[in-house]
Image (cartoon, coloured by chain):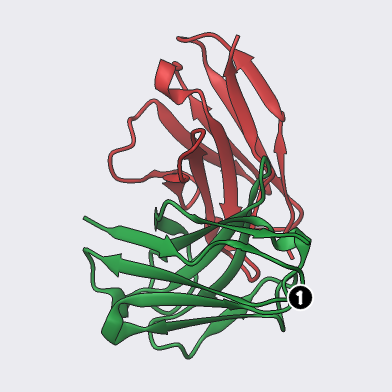
Chain colours: A green, B red
Amino acid sequence: EVQLVESGGTFVQPGRSLRLSCAASGFSFDSYVMHWVRQAPGKGLEWVAGINWDSFIVHYADSVKGRFTISRDNARNSLYLQMDSLRPEDTALYYCAKDKGGSLFFYFESWGQGTLVTVSS
Amino acid sequence: EIVLTQSPGTLSLSPGERATLSCRASQSVSRSSLAWYQQKPGHAPRLLMYYASTRATGIPDRFSGSESGTDFTLTISRLEPEDFAVYYCQQYGSSPLTFGGGTKVEIK
């Protein structure tokens, strides 16, 4: 059974940094594209970033480009999101999601339960 | 960027009724690369459909998807109590991946 467990979400002030983690199990982590998707309170879903199996292909939403960095450690079955220069509009529940594919970006087959990031002064 | 517009925003129906949800793309979505998700309050989204009309594992056949040009439709033939939720479409034909704003199916 696929399991994705996010951690690292917390309350943080604008301009600060935060690193989210996602621990994966139940599948061959090093064979799949992984993503971060966020959902602001009471709002819809927004794709944030994706990374292919060998970290060679990385894409970001324009809203986070230059501030967020997605990475992975296949030896640790872990996905990360380094979030710098945080803004109040980054406040959201951040989901880790497993893609259907290994190199190209497709749809989100499995989701974690999310970790909440609140950016406020 | 492909913008997905979902309508209606809210659908008020009774159990047993048919639900028709729309997702319109601002431009062509290559290779029918559109997925649908269901999200219940306090839960993560769940994949329902991919490539516009292929049901994900374990999804009952009362759920169906179709496509006509840039218009995509999710149909629930007979609403069960557990189907009342928010539904999102998502395109993966081009980067960035984008979602529609969602349709809430509520009990009338």
Q: In the rendered image, which quarter contains the N terminus of chain A? A: bottom left
For the question of whether residue B80 can be seen, the reply is no
Q: Which residue bears the numbered disc 1?
A: A15
Residue sitting at x 71%, y 33%: B7
Residue type beneath disc 1: Gly
Which of these two is toward me, A69 or A56?
A: A69
Q: Position of residue B65 (x, y in %)?
A: 49, 38
Callout count: 1
Q: Quadrant of residue A30?
A: bottom left
Q: Position of residue B9 (x, y in %)?
A: 72, 30
Chain at tag 1: A
For the residue labelled by badge 1, is the local secondary structure a helix, a strand or a loop?
loop
Q: Position of residue B69 (x, y in %)?
A: 66, 48
Outermost residue on the front side: it is: A121
Residue sitting at x 65%, y 21%: B11
Residue sitting at x 57%, y 61%: A10
Which of these two is toward me, A77 or B99?
A: A77
Side of B58 where A62 appears, left or right: right
Residue sitting at x 29%, y 45%: B57
Which of these two is toward me, A36 or A10?
A: A10
Q: Position of residue A73 (x, y in %)?
A: 36, 85
Q: Quadrant of residue A14?
A: bottom right
For the question of whether residue B97 can be seen, the reply is yes
Q: In the rendered image, which quarter contains the C terminus of chain A? A: bottom right
Outermost residue on the bottom side: it is: A56
Side of B48 where B57 appears, left or right: left
Which of these two is toward me, B1 or A59?
A: A59
Q: Relative to B58, say whether B93 is above or below.
A: below
Around disc 1, counting alpha carbons within 10 Å, would you say few (fewer than 14), some (14 to 19), or many (20 or more)? some
Q: Relative to A17, say whether B15 is above or below.
A: above
